[in-house]
Amino acid sequence: MQPIADLDVLDLDPEADAPAPVSSAPDARGADQPRVVAPRAGTNGRSVFIETYGCQMNVADSELVASILGGEGYALAEREEDADVVLINTCAIREKAEDRVRGRLTHIRARKEKSQPGLQIGVLGCMAERLRSKLLEQERLVDLVVGPDAYRDLPRLLAESRDTGQAAVNVQLSREETYADLAPVRYDTNGVSAFVSIMRGCDNMCAFCVVPFTRGRERSRPVTSILSEVGQLVDAGYKEVTVLGQNVNSYRVEQDGSAVDFAELLYRISLLSPELRIRYSTSHPKDCSDALLHVHRERPTVCDFIHLPVQHGNSDVLKRMRRTYTREHYLDLVERARSIVPGIAFSTDLIAGFCGETDAEHADTLSLMREVQYDHAFMFAYSERPDTYAARKYSDDVPEAVKKARLTEIITLQTEHSLASNRRRVGTEQVVLVEGTSKRSDDQLRGRTDTNHMVVFDRPAGLNKGDYAVVRVDDCTSATLLGSFVRATTLEAESARLGPEAA
Ligand code: SAH
Ligand code: SF4
Ligand code: F3S
């Protein structure tokens, strides 16, 4: 999922702070640019400021928190300094992500002690469970610690901590909670693209990963509530949804005596509007079925792009990582996808320097990258996380300098591949969904192709955010396609033009 504040992520995209449905990994905005809320009136005289770190799931969760607290009369404050309650929605995926959050908490705590004694500071999200005792007792940084399945309890916990002056805690994980009935408050939105959570938790237990510990068991949200939320987004004028989960393609619910899997869910979402682009993040290679690939092929609004994290290119390392597939399985899957959905684009996540990684094993990651030729990637140095299988069973034995050097090689190679992927599109016409103005100039618009490539082009009169346009690609950098406007269009018109195969 698109990360928000993590310096060890390389994001090659200078336009990347658009809601970019790409990866489930924390993103590259930098720690100084977390997502914050827009002002909204309240009725109980109190206001809350929410700052979100980590992946898109956390962004979606902050929208739920805004909804829950809005329902209790809290206003959303624009600036941290104006709020009665500051909530930090945290990420624990790598050590750096945790360090950064701790730095923020220390800073806010100092301000509270100096000038705002009534301020309530809360930690939400993925650091909650593991760090609750440390944050509350040893460091006395926070008044509230609330885990990802306990957000409905927030109003009560806030009142309790205010009344008692003591810290209030609920880090209980649930096997059922999906917040299915809540309408998220979309406060940080371009009005064009939205995230929709379809499942929570993860059962995969990859050896390196803290997520199953921080977010609990996997559970899928009922189909009807997903379709109803997407329907409301369509009615509100949204043109793109990214359905979210740590492992979206293991989505499965029983409904009316039969099972609905991820392929079926996507198909049903695609029936809601011919003008709504559909993306998803993030998918596990073990669950990428042929049925899903056929939905990509048959439904023109299901984008021809898959974020398919491989993590590593060597089968022994994949086994140590407990990813449950081999290099060969993964390459077969990519080939199958390309034969069923010609032109489909791929992005991935890669980890450098996992426990015991040899030079030869690392070289296999580079060779896999050369074989697949990813359009985009999120790349990380391995960071040991407490309680994970890797932390318990293996030694974090690749020296930091070697991890960094290997990561640099991976990043350098990916930059070449991203450039090549963009160059292949020069001279083509692409259907672009306009997301807003370019960061560099108000005279230019920015949007994405079906394959998730960022395009910037001169703004023609009358074309607005949320419109589709055919854009001819004239040039590119490794991060962005540079194009010129050809004509305004609709998705329906384009799929009709491409013929029955695409319709
Ligand atoms: N559910 C997603 C991944 C979520 S975490 C999936 O399985 O694809 C996002 C990415 O962070 C992972 O894909 C992985 O590349 C990276 N990551 C997770 N734990 C890590 C760790 N301990 N050190 C470095 N990178 C890690
Ligand atoms: Fe973590 Fe693996 Fe689950 Fe992804 S699939 S969240 S990497 S345990
Ligand atoms: Fe996401 Fe970070 Fe939690 S990546 S699931 S916010 S540990």
Image (cartoon, rainbow, N blue to C red):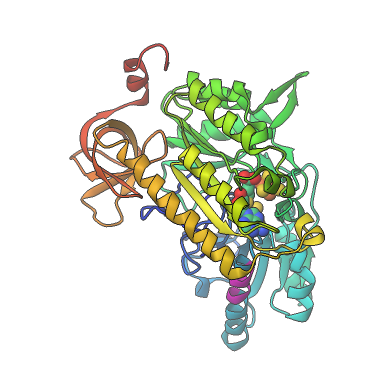
Q: Where residue 44 appears, x then y in whole percent? A: 61, 63
- In the picture, the quarter occupied by the C terminus is top left
Q: Nearer the viewer, residue 322 or 439?
A: 322
Horizontal arrangement in the rendering, residue 2 relative to residue 113 (left or right): left
Instruction: Tell me: residue 292, above or below residue 455.
Output: above
* Residue ID at (36%, 50%): 479
Instruction: Tell me: residue 466, above or below residue 317.
Output: above
Horizontal arrangement in the rendering, residue 417 relative to residue 156 (left or right): left
Instruction: Tell me: residue 207, above or below residue 292.
Output: below
Whether 101 is among the magenta residues is yes
Residue 58 appears in the rendering: no
Q: Main secondary structure of the magenta part?
A: helix
User: Could you say which quadrant of the image residue 17 lies in?
Assistant: bottom left
* Residue ID at (31%, 36%): 425
* Residue ID at (66%, 29%): 223
Q: Where residue 18 appears, x then y in whole percent? A: 41, 50
Q: Name the residue furthest left.
A: 461
Count of all numbered marks drawn on residues in the image: 0
First to last magenta residue range: 98-104
Horizontal arrangement in the rendering, residue 298 relative to residue 393 (left or right): left
Q: Name the residue furthest top.
A: 500
Q: Where residue 341 appears, x then y in whole percent? A: 48, 23
Q: Nearer the viewer, residue 255 or 501?
A: 501
Whether 146 is among the magenta residues is no
Q: Where residue 461 appears, x then y in whole percent? A: 18, 40
Residue 475 appears in the rendering: yes
Q: Name the residue furthest front.
A: 360
Q: Nearer the viewer, residue 501 or 433?
A: 501
